[in-house]
Amino acid sequence: MILAIPVFFINLVILACILKLVFGYDSMELSWPAALLLGTIVSITDACEVVEVIEKLGLSDKFRTLCELEALLNDGTGIIFFILFSDMADLTHPA
């Protein structure tokens, strides 16, 4: 659980770097804040899917609870980063 926030942040930064550096989007096509915003959206895990896999594998209730808590922490972290990067990205275009 301690690593949930740092690993989430590292994941979204890696995804943003892949968009900018590997796929070659320049600043006119995709700014760094917009790339980080997209990385945030993609990085949020689906808690329902995780719980379903745990139930199929028959793992303990304690492990299931830990995974649910971690997923909730990721969702909360994702919302904070989404708000931060959406304000930074300023995706509105003048008419």
Image (cartoon, helix red, strand yellow):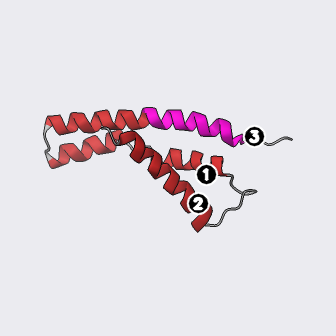
Which of pointers 1 and 2 lies earlier in the amino acid sequence? Answer: 2
Q: Main secondary structure of the magenta part?
A: helix
Mark 2 residue type: Leu
> Residue 77: within the magenta?
yes
- The residue stretch that appears in magenta: 76-92
Considering depth in this image, is 67 or 88 the residue closer to the camera? 88
Give residue 35's mark.
Answer: 1
Q: Mark 3–mark 1 contact, CB under 8 Å?
A: no
**Left or right, residue 73 beside residue 16:** left
Q: Mark 3 and mark 1: span between their CA atoms? A: 15 Å
Residue under label 3:
92
Give residue 19's mark.
Answer: 2
Image position, residue 8 (x, y; %):
43, 45
Q: Mark 1–mark 2 contact, CB under 8 Å?
A: yes
Q: Mark 2 and mark 3: span between their CA atoms? A: 20 Å
Mark 3 or 1: in front is 1
